[in-house]
């Protein structure tokens, strides 16, 4: 029995403690909870995805209740970046290297570690030649 402030715990006390523990455990193990926490700050920003795993992108879109589109060609990102001061892109480490090689200036970068690996949320500008 667990004592609670000088009294014996009741069944409802034990259920409340168990329910709280279950909620905390569930939050830790939800595949999208880490991604949700990271992306909620950028809810009003237009974000594009480049070289992203479709499963991770679907998880982000589901938990964020938004659609982040996958851009397959770096030329399409260049066109989008030419029309803006900077654009947000989520990508992999390989994708980040390609963007740098293609002439993107990375003005900020954040590595987000989650259950399936790591992704990068970057803000970039394209420096046209």
Image (cartoon, rainbow, N blue to C red):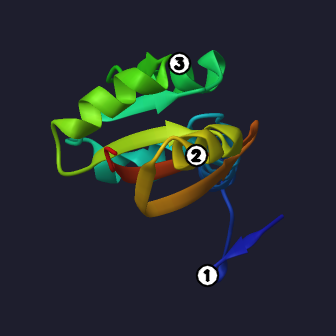
Label 1 to label 3: alpha-carbon separation: 47 Å
From the image, tell me which residue sits under label 2: 101
Mark closest to the chain's N terminus, 2 or 1: 1
Point 65% across, 23% down: residue = 53
Q: Is residue 127 left or right of residue 72?
A: left
Q: Are marks 2 and 3 in contact (CB under 8 Å)?
A: no
Mark closest to the chain's N terminus, 1 or 3: 1
Look at the picture and state if 118 lies above or below 67: below
From the image, tell me which residue sits under label 1: 5
- Residue 99, numbered label: none
Report x, y in % for residue 122. Answer: 45, 52
Element at label 3: helix
Q: Are marks 1 and 3 in contact (CB under 8 Å)?
A: no
- Residue 98 vs residue 42, the one in the foreground: 98
Camera-near label (1 vs 3) is 3
Mark closest to the chain's N terminus, 2 or 3: 3
Element at label 2: helix
Camera-near label (2 vs 1) is 2
């Amino acid at each position: 029995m667990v004592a609670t402030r000088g009294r014996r715990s009741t069944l409802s006390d034990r259920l409340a403690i168990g329910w709280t523990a279950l909620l905390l455990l569930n939050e830790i193990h939800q595949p999208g909870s880490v991604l949700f926490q990271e992306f909620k700050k950028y809810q009003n920003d237009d974000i594009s995805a480049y070289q992203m795993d479709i499963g991770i992108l679907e998880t982000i879109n589901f938990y964020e209740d938004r659609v982040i589109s996958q851009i397959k060609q770096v030329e399409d990102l260049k066109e989008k970046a030419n029309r803006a001061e900077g654009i947000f892109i989520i990508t992999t480490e390989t994708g980040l290297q390609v963007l740098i090689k293609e002439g993107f200036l990375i003005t900020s970068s954040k590595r987000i570690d989650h259950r399936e690996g790591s992704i990068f949320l970057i803000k970039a500008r394209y420096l046209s030649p």
